[in-house]
Amino acid sequence: MLIGIALALLAGSLVSLQNVFNSKMNERTGSWSTTTIVLAMGFLASFVLGAIMEGASFFTLQPIKPWYAFSGLLGVGVVICLVNALRLTSPTFAVSLVMTSQLATALLFDSFGGLGLEKVPFAFNKLIGVLIIIAGVMVFQFGGKMKPLHALLRRSIIINESDCDSKAS
């Protein structure tokens, strides 16, 4: 269990580092170039390390459902979405939203046993945990800025209403 926790913490750190690297690369190359380079490097690294670590068994594939082989396509979506989210928001906010989304999606698939996962009974305390994390992300991002944000939204609504009034005249 402790090794699993350590690996999960390491994975989270690596994802955050990768996001920073991807964001910096995206500033110079663009989203699709970044995605291509990142996934190509990942392919090359995993191919070489897999061949070294597993030897000949690396090339022996067990039968799987065909759609599981397309998970690499999800990686394209992950990199494209993250690179652009980082560009449009901030690294901390984007990663917070990604983690929240991951947790909510995992809860959904666990509860329904989706994609061949073992069904885990739904518990409201898990939903409350996700909602608390969402609230935490909002406090973290907008904590001292709620009044200015509210004023900005209100001013935006007033401006839009005045635009409608002037167009109606």
Image (tube, grey):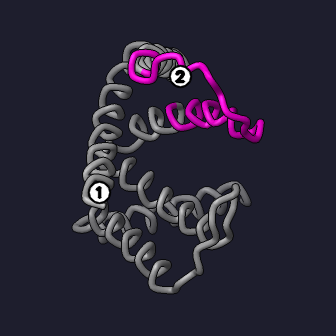
Q: Is residue 43 magenta?
A: no
Q: Is residue 25 above or below residue 110?
A: above
Residue occupied by mark 1 = 5
Three-letter code for the amino acid on which mark 2 is drawn: Phe
Q: Nearer the viewer, residue 51 or 46?
A: 51
Name the quadrant containing residue 137. bottom left
Q: Is residue 71 magenta?
A: yes
Camera sees residue 127: yes
| CA gap, disc 1 and disc 2 | 26 Å
Q: Is residue 98 above or below residue 111?
A: above
Describe residue 84's horizontal placement relative to residue 149 as left or right. Answer: right
Position of residue 48 measured from the top left corner of the image (x, y, whole percent): 43, 13
| Element class at badge 2 | helix
Name the quadrant containing residue 90. top left
Name the quadrant containing residue 1. bottom left
Position of residue 86 measured from the top left corner of the image (x, y, whole percent): 39, 38
Question: Residue drawn 64% across and 71% down?
Answer: 119
Residue 58's disc is: 2
Question: Which segment is the magenta one?
Answer: 50-79
Camera sees residue 30: no
Question: Which comes before the other along the chain, label 1 or label 2?
Answer: 1
